[in-house]
Amino acid sequence: MPNPLPASFFQGPLVDPKTGKANYAFLKWLQNLEVKTGPTLTIAKDGQIQPTAIINGRTEGISTTVSNINPTGTFNSLGNVVDTSTDHLTDGTGKPLTGGKRGFVALDTNNRLTGTFRANAVNVSAVPAAATNLSNNGIATAISVASFMTQFGDGQISYNSGSVDPGSFTGPVYVYADDPTFAGGAVTWQFSLTQTDQSAANGRVLAGSITTVNGTSKTGGGSTGGTGGGRGGRQYT
Amino acid sequence: MAHRTKITSYEKPANNLFTVIIHCCGEHEHRHTVGPEVLNDPVKFYASVDWAHTEAAKNHAAAQAADSKLHDMVGTEQEHP
């Protein structure tokens, strides 16, 4: 049945002028109207939609369709959501979803960090494998940083060699690099004569310290501190 | 044997330090960090870079020698009591 209903009776009188009865086309139109509206609207004065009325394309009554919507037009419970994946949500103020994911990755079931490499390098224990890794020949002021491996709780990290030059024979010269992701390899070795600079950045790893003397070769850093320095790793010197 | 070095780039890590990245013979890279006392004295700076290269070349030569030695050992067999 097309919608709206065809009104062919409008081409002639609605009723037979002799009998006063409605013509066939008009009667048929009224019948079709009742078929459509009867199951859909109530006979109450305001013609409300029947709870069993079906939205085109659906099979359930409209009362089932809107059963989870409150009178104020709001959804009544997250328990009635079929697809509960948070992938459909937009992260809110403070990024609770992003933070939750990071926590899931970084924390274990006891709410502790899953491992050393989830912490900041400056706060973890580490021991260099070599006895020393800093050296100076007593002739030039530059300090050689040998490549070395450091043992952390989560594994071993190896750092490439390098060199620093404070420009004079002095000490203690504290040697360190910034490696916030425990990547190892080629790092930029830095130096300072200020002891507290060894813990002045979260990603700091320590080679140790050395005191250089004109005319005398010295070693430092590593696990022993050598002949003229302090140990590296977690133990600041 | 003379080596040709090239300062390919530099970094400024922190606290008035400057790290020059030196390449030798187009091969290995060495990072050498100096403070302003060295950087502001051209003679001192180039001497320092030259020293750094020498050390890097030594390390590189040692690494190459070890690599060569291991290469020769591949395929050899030893008897053990």
Image (cartoon, rainbow, N blue to C red):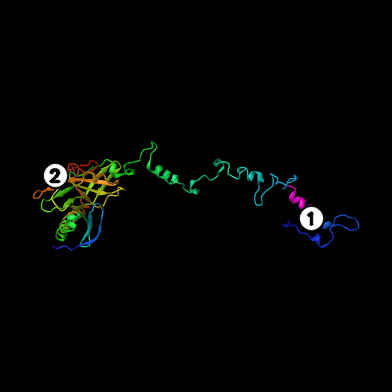
> Is residue B16 located in the magenta-colored stretch of the structure?
no
Q: Quadrant of the C terminus of chain B?
A: top left
The residue beneath circle 2 is A228
In the rendered structure, which amino acid carries the disc numbered 2? Gly
Task: Name which residue lies at 77% across and 53% down.
Answer: A32
Residues at marks 2 and 1, CA–CA distance in whole angstroms: 109 Å
Q: Main secondary structure of the magenta part?
A: helix
Q: Which chain letter matches label 2?
A: A
Quadrant housing residue B56 = bottom left
Quadrant housing residue A229 = top left
Label 2–label 1 contact, CB within 8 A: no
> Is residue A35 located in the magenta-colored stretch of the structure?
yes
The residue beneath circle 1 is A29
Name the residue at the top extreme: A110
Mark earlier in primary sequence (2, 1) = 1
Q: Quadrant of the N terminus of chain B?
A: bottom left
Residue A168 percent location from the top left of the image: 14, 52
Q: Which chain letter matches label 1?
A: A
Q: In the image, A27: left or right of A109?
A: right
Q: Nearer the viewer, residue A218 or A172?
A: A172
